[in-house]
Amino acid sequence: MSAVTGDSQERAVQCRGLTKSFGTGEARVPALRGLDLDIDYGEMAMLVGPSGCGKTTLLSIIAAVLDHDTGLCRVLGRDLKKLTVADKVLLRRQAIGFVFQAFNLIPTLTLADNVSVPLLLNGVGHAIARKRAGAMLDRLGLGNRVDALPSELSGGQQQRVAIARALVHGPRLVVCDEPTSALDAKTGDAVLHLLREVALEENRTLIIVTHDSRILKYADRIIEMSDGVIMQSGTSQSPVPDTRSNLP
Amino acid sequence: MFRLALTMLINERGKYLGIIAALSFTALMMAQQPSIFLGMLSRATALIDDIPSADLWVMDPNVQYSDDSKPLQDAQLYRVKGIAGVEWAVPFFSGSIQARLPDGNFRNCILYGIDDATFIGGPAKMVEGRITDLRQSDGVVVDAASAKGVLAQTAAGDQREPLGVGSTLELNDLRASIVGLHGGEPNVQSQPIIYTTYNRVKFFKSSDRKLLSFILVKLQPGVDAAQVVRNIRRYTGLAAYTKAEFSTMSSNYFLFRTGIFLNFGISALISFLIGGSIAAQTFYNFTLDHLRYFGVLKAMGASSRLLFAMIALQMLCAGAIGFGVGIGIVTFFGVVVQGGTVAFSLNYWIVGGAALAILLLSLGTALLSSRPVRRLEPAAVFRG
Ligand SMILES: Nc1ncnc2c1ncn2[C@@H]1O[C@H](COP(=O)(O)OP(=O)(O)OP(=O)(O)O)[C@@H](O)[C@H]1O
Ligand SMILES: [Mg+2]
């Protein structure tokens, strides 16, 4: 394990001077401007900030679906700049779980099939994958709906299925972009509760981008971004500025 | 993942059935049109192929195919008989004649006149009666399919009454009585095929001066066919071809001098284009509808190659089912029309050709449909 200057301990995510721009020339939009960030293993970090400040961009880079321009980004001990496309595909497949705002369950597949996908991608046999998917759905309170289609479920239930899918293959890092914004307050709260309970086992790291200040209480740490850099980082017990006041 | 890929497609019932239906149509037309064409082609040479004992066919040099008759003088028969290497030579008439049915309807028929003494040139297979029954006065032999079909009388109340042994019809206003039914198929134009003796043709077609269409020649054992052909040309001025040559000539004429090949080719091609584009379009839309989910799979670590394999499998499966349904229908069609007036001949080449067409179509569609998936950035999953 290669040591990073100034750090005695390997972190789950480590960014130094991270930059990312979109477009070229006149239309160039800098989304990240030399951002520094550390997130530990076993930590549930929430990323907040006004719209367009670069939260999704940062999350995409950390999740290895988007390449950054300059700076360092180490995720789960790997320097992303040094990974090939195939390496990144493998990293995502084995080590990262995804939860989306719009659930993104495949509508023509049953819950069990949807949750099986990460296992199947990792070469697990169909029967075992189904069994493990069923067990994970069970833990999220949907054990009796394994053969239902996503369209037969409520939004909160669908997001629980998405969480099951993000966790089933035991990834070390789970990234969530606005997981509660399509849900009402009560359902959102319940989903976060469950996410915290199930996801944080095994020293897993969770990064959640959110606009929803009601769920901030679940975070170990709240990272506030503004205009492509980190403004402030603190625990949920310490006072956190109300991010909603910055919204249009 | 491949199982899930198929489930994804099958559960999209409407699109799935649409794709299968379009592919079935394509396979059906791709097999049925060539089958009918091939059936017609084999009818075009049936006369030649069905007379195995004739080694050579002698005819006017301008004749191009078996139904193209340019009559010779009867004396030519005796000249040919006299040529060295000829074992025997018999006259053969091929022409058309108007048949009047008992109900007063007219039909254009093909009339063949065969040698009175030997009956050489007669039909390959008799269904009822014997060819020697042609010795009976006014005797003719009609193909069984036409006897049941186009020649059947539509007398009282639209009831079709098949002709049989003992029935009569009028050929050129002269009475002919059916003494047998043969198993040959009607000709390319689905005209009935009537056999009688060469001398009786002179009676039915008394207005025609010359009736000798072909001279059928049997070679003596061991003689060189090419040498006899040359001699016939030299001494009579007539053209002579071996059975195989004349058969090829006739089918080539049918292939290249008539528009039929082109017509069938074009209709098979149009079917392929229409059915194929509907199937491709529907499948492409299916993929576009699922683009977001392919993106999710990509983000979750599915390689582009795996996604292509999933898409190809979906399309190939639909192709295989469509092919099965299409060929099934064509085969059923073939069984139904067998022995009837519709020419039809389905062989493995046609089935293989249709399979290849569907395979290429499926692969092409999969390739086309996987393009947007391949271009999809995995980061797109977090946007909109
Ligand atoms: N693919 C892209 N092409 C061009 N510009 C982009 C692209 N993605 C993001 N941007 C720009 O980068 C900046 C940061 O966008 P990002 O989506 O990361 O913000 P965000 O904090 O997630 O906003 P929101 O809270 O609205 O989701 C914005 O100005 C955005 O317009
Ligand atoms: Mg965002």
Image (cartoon, helix red, strand yellow):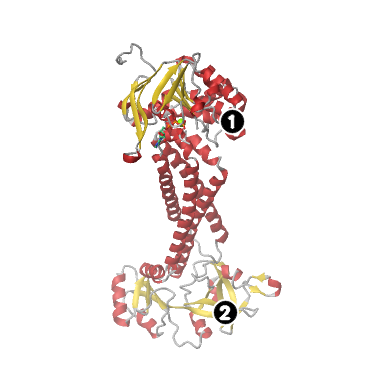
Q: Judge whether residue B317 can be spotted in this image.
A: no
For residue A7, above or below residue B164: above
- Residue closest to the far right: B157
Name the amino acid type tagged 1.
Gly
Q: Answer with left or right where residue B88 lies relative to residue B35.
A: left
Q: Chain of mark 2?
A: B
Q: Answer with left or right where residue B288 lies relative to residue A4.
A: right
Which type of secondary structure does the marked residue at label 2 adopt? strand
Label 1 neighbourhood size at 10 Å, few (<14), some (14-19), many (20+)?
A: some
Query: Ligand 1 sits in which quadrant?
Result: top left
For residue A167, above or below residue B84: above
Q: Position of residue B377 (x, y in %)?
A: 40, 36
The image's mark for residue B101 is: none
Q: Chain of mark 1?
A: A
Q: CA distance from mark 2 to mark 1?
A: 79 Å
Quarter-of-image position of residue A161: top right
On whether disc 2 and disc 1 are found on a single subunit, the reply is no
Q: Judge whether residue A219 can be spotted in this image.
A: yes
Q: Answer with left or right where residue B350 lies relative to residue B145.
A: left
Residue for badge 2:
B99
> Which dot, 2 or 1, sits closer to the camera?
1
Nearer-the-camera pick, B123 or B346: B346
The image's mark for residue A155 is: 1
For residue B155, above or below residue A155: below
Q: For the image shown, how many numbered marks are present on the structure?
A: 2
- Residue closest to the far top: A8
Nearer-the-camera pick, A145 or A194: A194
Which type of secondary structure does the marked residue at label 1 adopt? helix
Q: Position of residue A125 (x, y in %)?
A: 48, 27
For residue B138, above or below residue B358: below
Name the amino acid type tagged 2.
Ala
Ligand 2 within 8 Å, label 1 CB: no
